[in-house]
Amino acid sequence: MSITGIEAPAVEVRGLVRDFAVKGGPPRRALDDFDLAVAPGEVHGLLGPNGAGKTTLCKILSTVLLPTAGTARVQGLDVVADAKRVRPLLGIVFGGERGLYARMTAAQNLRFWAALYGHGRREGRRRAAELLERVGLGPRADEAVETFSRGMKQRLHLARGLVGDPRVLLLDEPTVGMDPVSAHEFRDLVEDLRAEGRAVLLTTHDMAEAEALCDRVSFIDGGRLLRCEDPRVLGELLSRHERVRASGVPEALAARLAALPGVERVRATGPGAVLVETDRGGAALPVLRTLVEAGVTDVSTAPPSLEEVYLHLIGDRGMAVRP
Amino acid sequence: MRGSSPAFWAAARFQLGEFRRDPGTLLMLVTAPFFAVILLSVTEHGGRADLAPYAILAPAVMASIGMAVMEAGETIFRDRTAGVLEAVLTTPAPLATVLLGRIAAITAVSLAGIAECWLVGAVGFGVVVHVAHPLVFALTLAATAAGIAATGVLMAAVFVVGRNVRSFQNSLTFPLYLLGGAMVPVALLPSGVEALSRVFFLSWATDLLRDSLAPEPVAAFWPRLAAVLGLAAATFAAGSWLSHRLVRRVRRNGTVGFA
């Protein structure tokens, strides 16, 4: 809370720049004049391809990396000048399998991390047991982490991120390696965190996850913020890219569809099946009319998925790593 | 500082668990009795039974400081490789406190080397070394343990920036044995080396430990103990300062997670 009584943003990033030295070459810019604001209680998605700068941002916010320029604040506290006061407010879940003691049990790991957040032995035990139950690892609490599957390790990572009772949670690709059931449970957990008033910054490649969980989504590429929107608003912005799916479409009809105004392209998705992509609002209507008039009845329309939005925003480079 | 005390004890408990999970970390306690055998053989065959306390104390002190330095490096190396160092740095607990907890546990366990070497003397050679001044011995031993733990923190701080710490820590142990008077009392070293050794707490500590075993009264015990404690505190302060500085450096360079 600020001195004016107005609650500070959970995360506020302004003009953030981070350069990395490259041997024998110019520095590589991982973040370039990056701005971001996450409100308290907001679940904010950060989407971008590999090397876009997502993890660099998480590392700066979690105080393990210093910015080259610009400012980053967590609940009004500067992550550089007030790093010691920022750390108790933050929980971070790094992606992958790193960050846990493999030969310790899940409970021992959590008790250790609880102590690093200042919790005494009794409180650490209580929190560890509670969090292990919460992430579904209660029955495996006393087993060594090295025996866990990747998905179980991810769940333990989540528990570790929560052990300090943070107001702001940074989740860097948290569902990598999780099975669909666990991923669904994870979404429920994030909903609970939102209900508890915690802010969550979630980096992910999973569009469905972002669409389902996030209040707003920021698209990042080359260290720059491309767009920050409500995922549905962003979908509306690109409604001109509405798609029509149809099957039983002969080649000649497909060619006629491609020639219609506003049709961007017609892709064959199987024998006689096509996906018609439009690039103009209302362009789907003549496509539907043409199909129905030709006797095609297996037809459906759909708005662009978040993934398509994402691909439209970052261009044809898709998931390629920026040089 | 929030979190310091639970972090210290949790780190110490964690390290004790590491000894159970990986007994290889206790290797120096395996080798210390062999060193004791070598040194006692030399003193016995040389007709210098009066040097037996030296022969017993030397390998024990070497094991203790050696374990602290070696494990300090391993702690950073392993945590970095496992991506844990990065996670530790995101917590409110100061890195120096976590390191101190772990290295204090290592040092406490390493003191078992004294009992091992004493037993080698008693059982293997029939040489029973008596502690003539038990209070002096106990207080000095406690101060020595604190100094060894502080040295481990200082070394670990250096290893935060190093990428190839193993060769460094291997090379470092012998100068520390020498400057600490573990093998040879520093008074017997060339004057320049002796002067240098006097800024290292261990040189005062080993002299006091040896004196506590001899029947003669221990001269200027309290000032000498104060020197051990003062230099140990200075070493820990240097380790804390250095770990703070070097962590800031790796945060700036972006090399926290590099193994």
Image (cartoon, grey):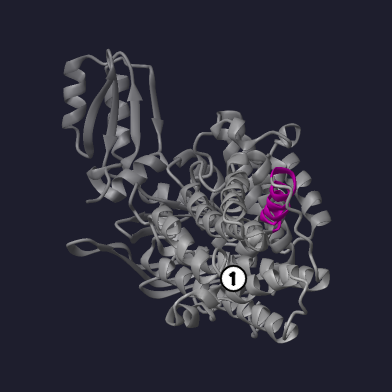
The relative height of residue A55 versus residue B203 in the rendered view (above or below) is above
Q: How many marks?
A: 1
Residue A162 visible in the current orientation: yes
The relative height of residue A273 versus residue B144 in the rendered view (above or below) is above
Q: Which sits in the foreground, B189 or A19?
A: B189
In the visual, does B2 lie left or right of B240?
right
The relative height of residue B208 versus residue A310 in the rendered view (above or below) is below
Q: Where is residue B81 in the image (x, y as percent from the top left)?
A: 46, 48
Alpha-carbon neighbours of circle 1 within 10 Å: few (<14), some, or many (≥20)? many
The extreme front residue here reads: B47
Q: Which sits in the foreground, B204 or A53?
A: B204
Span shown in magenta = B108-124
Q: Residue at x 51, y 52 (%)?
A: B74
Q: Residue at x 44, y 65 (%)?
A: A65
The relative height of residue B213 versus residue A123 in the rendered view (above or below) is below
In the visual, does A160 lie left or right of A56?
right
Can you identify the residue that label 1 sits on? A86
Q: Which residue is drawn at 82% across and 68% down?
A: B134
Q: Which sits in the foreground, A51 or A14?
A: A51
Res. A197 image quadrant: bottom right
Q: Magenta part mainly helix, strand or loop?
A: helix
Q: Is residue B154 magenta?
A: no
**Type of amino acid under label 1:** Val
Q: Which sits in the foreground, A232 or B236?
A: B236
